[in-house]
Amino acid sequence: TALIILILGLSLGLTVGRRNIRSTFFSRCEKFKEHDCKKLWDLFEKAYVNKDPCKVPVEAYNPLIAAAPFKPQCNKMMFWSKTKDVVHGLTAKRKDCFVTLEDTLLGSVLDDLTWCGKEGSKDTFTAGCPEWSECVNNPVRSFWNRSSAAFADVACGDVTAMLSGSIDTPFNSTSNFASIEVPRFKASRVKKLNVVMVIQKNAISNCNHPSLKNLRQSLDTGITYSCKDVSESRIQECGAKPEIACGACW
Ligand code: C8R
């Protein structure tokens, strides 16, 4: 009996887990009226279901991204590295000023989720999936890599990036921002990159950090660079006061 209860419990857990990601996907997706969520779910599943969870390449998401392409939103596109919470605290309130990948259909649907498949199974699993660095071609990492690339490809006008003054290397070559997004900013589309260094109490770096020289050097010739140290409280103030013009946030 104990064994049967264990097996029943396990399969119930798995079903609930799967229903969870599926229902999260649909409820988040349905907020964006212009898309066929069933079709997007099917394309999403096809990327990783019935595959070894360390063998899902970035290209597996091409059909999904083609079905819900990122729209260029010139002068509003916001990139970040190690500042996710501060950035989304701001963009949740100032959609008139900034859009991040997590404000787009696919980014918002999959934000903070974990998923993977298994060889020989039609199911989606949300536990026991590879960690970010466990293997390069894991389903979550490949999704964010593919979608960050597509989002950066359509960047245009003045682009903003929030980097952290609370870490040793604000511009780190191993980040998605440095390795995937910056190399895709093209001078034909992007006029300027405005870096905002988020300065929290106990900050250890700022716009003078040597790693930012690498950022300037990796930018396509013709893209202007600027950097400004901005306190976290000033960023929060911009979020709290809709009357502050976007260009006057810092
Ligand atoms: N981007 C990357 N990773 C993302 C993401 C996103 O939009 N959204 C989520 N939830 N994640 P980091 P980075 C998750 O190290 O490597 C885009 C991933 O699962 O602070 O420099 C975005 O456009 C992963 O675990 O950032 C942004 O501009 C962490 O967040 C850069 O790439 C990665 O967080 C940020 O990539």
Image (spheres, rainbow, N blue to C red):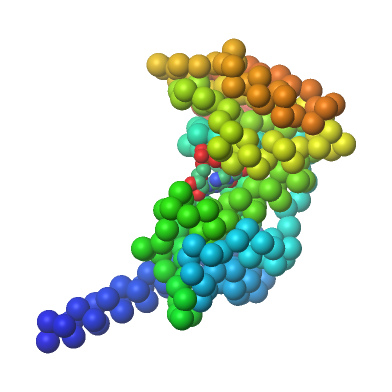
Q: Can the viewer see residue 90 in this picture?
A: no
Residue 136 picture location, percent across and down: 52, 53
Q: Does residue 115 sit above or below 185 in this rendering? A: below
Residue at position x 76%, y 37% in the image: 185
Single out the residue that lies furthest toward the left.
1
Residue at position x 77%, y 46% in the image: 154
Q: Is residue 116 left or right of residue 176?
A: left
Residue 110 picture location, percent across and down: 53, 57
Residue at position x 12%, y 82% in the image: 2
Question: Residue 211 versus residue 108: which sits nearer the camera?
Answer: 211
Q: Is residue 6 left or right of residue 136?
A: left
Q: Does residue 49 sit above or below 71 in this rendering? A: below
Residue at position x 51%, y 72% in the image: 51
Single out the residue that lies furthest toward the top.
208
Q: Can the viewer see residue 45 in this picture?
A: yes
Q: Quadrant location of the N terminus?
A: bottom left
Q: Quadrant of ligand 1?
A: top right
Question: Residue 242 versus residue 94: which sits nearer the camera?
Answer: 94
Residue 92 picture location, percent across and down: 56, 41
Residue 230 found in image quarter: top right
Q: Quadrant location of the C terminus?
A: top right
Q: Does residue 236 sit above or below 176 in this rendering? A: above
Q: Is residue 129 left or right of residue 103?
A: left
Residue 39 picture location, percent across and down: 65, 74
